[in-house]
């Protein structure tokens, strides 16, 4: 995977699809990596799809300082990627944490976001449940650090089929720097919900696709439904549960593909050769 540098951070990313197609950046969820977005990327062969490992995730640098894991810091990762590749405007999509980061980027740099895909965003109704869950997981990661660290070389050598993304995610999670992961979870638990007031939403005029699903106190269906209703140009896809991202990925991919095809056509030149 190619890399970019942002200060003391090294960020890994991958490119999929058509290098001449309209650029789409897909952002993964908390504790996940860019590999969890590979299925969606594979369903968009006509687009130039960019997959980014946030810092603290995947192969990217994993600091242990809590102030490095603010949503604004992750948004800076995205802007660093766009600047590095000299891309002015993208379709920006994200899952859970990735959705909140995409939302942050759109608020800070609306001129660089052509459209938004927000899969399972977290807003005010999910904050209390999120703080309880993320604090518990932080304690778990702290306890796992001395237990699992000696086994990392063995676990990393376990063969995983190429498209077994869920198994690869489990392997990555078991071999993570669990002290960095604990810090990440504590930082996320202590952050406030993103704004969703009328003045804020009025700044988001780009087409937006929002998913909403039930039985999940962190990714509240009511927050997602309100968001889709209050944005000026948004549509909603209803899912049954959080498991649908893995179990019904074909339907999600089709919905995202249809949304992208409805956008005004654009042609992007191949990226310049470097080196």
Image (spheres, rainbow, N blue to C red):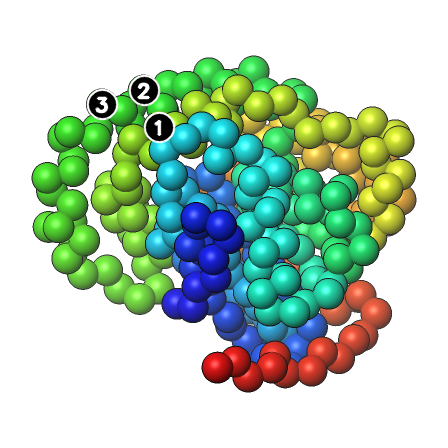
Residue at horizontal 88 percent and vertical 31 percent from the top: 199
Location of residue 100 in the rendering, given as x and y in whole percent from the top left corner: 62, 39
- Residue 252 lies in quadrant: bottom right
- State which quarter of the image contains the N terminus: bottom left
**Residue highlighted by disc 3:** 143
Residue 38 appears in view: no
Q: Which element is circle 1 on?
A: helix
**Residue highlighted by disc 2:** 139
- Whole-number angstrom distance, CA of label 1 to CA of label 3: 9 Å
**Mark 2–mark 3 CB contact (< 8 Å):** yes
The total of numbered circles placed on residues is 3
Location of residue 67 in the rendering, given as x and y in whole percent from the top left corner: 49, 29
Q: Which element is circle 3 on?
A: helix
The extreme front residue here reads 7
Location of residue 175 in the rendering, given as x and y in whole percent from the top left corner: 23, 44
Residue at horizontal 51 percent and vertical 53 percent from the top: 6
């Amino acid at each position: 995977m190619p890399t970019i540098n942002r200060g003391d951070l090294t960020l890994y990313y991958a490119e999929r699809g058509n290098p001449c197609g309209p650029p789409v950046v897909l952002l993964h969820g908390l504790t996940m990596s860019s590999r969890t977005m590979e299925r969606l990327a594979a369903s968009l062969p006509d687009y130039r799809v960019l997959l980014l490992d946030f810092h603290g995730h995947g192969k990217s640098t994993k600091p242990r300082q809590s102030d490095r894991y603010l949503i604004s810091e992750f948004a800076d990762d995205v802007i660093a990627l766009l600047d590095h590749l000299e891309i002015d405007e993208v379709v920006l999509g994200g899952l859970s944490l990735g959705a909140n980061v995409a939302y942050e980027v759109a608020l800070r740099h609306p001129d660089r976001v052509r459209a938004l895909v927000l899969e399972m965003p977290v807003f005010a109704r999910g904050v209390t449940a999120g703080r309880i869950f993320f604090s518990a997981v932080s304690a778990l990661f702290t306890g796992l650090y001395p237990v699992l660290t000696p086994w990392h070389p063995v676990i990393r050598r376990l063969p995983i089929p190429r498209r077994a993304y869920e198994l690869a995610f489990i392997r990555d999670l078991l071999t993570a720097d669990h002290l960095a992961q604990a810090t990440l979870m504590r930082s996320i638990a202590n952050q406030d919900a993103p704004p969703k007031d009328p003045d804020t939403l009025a700044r988001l005029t780009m087409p937006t696709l929002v998913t909403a699903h039930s039985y999940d106190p962190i990714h509240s269906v009511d927050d997602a439904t309100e968001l889709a209703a209050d944005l000026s140009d948004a549509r909603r896809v209803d899912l049954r549960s959080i498991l649908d991202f893995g179990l019904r990925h074909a339907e999600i991919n089709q919905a995202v593909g249809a949304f992208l095809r409805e956008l005004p056509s654009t042609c992007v030149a191949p990226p310049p050769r470097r080196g």
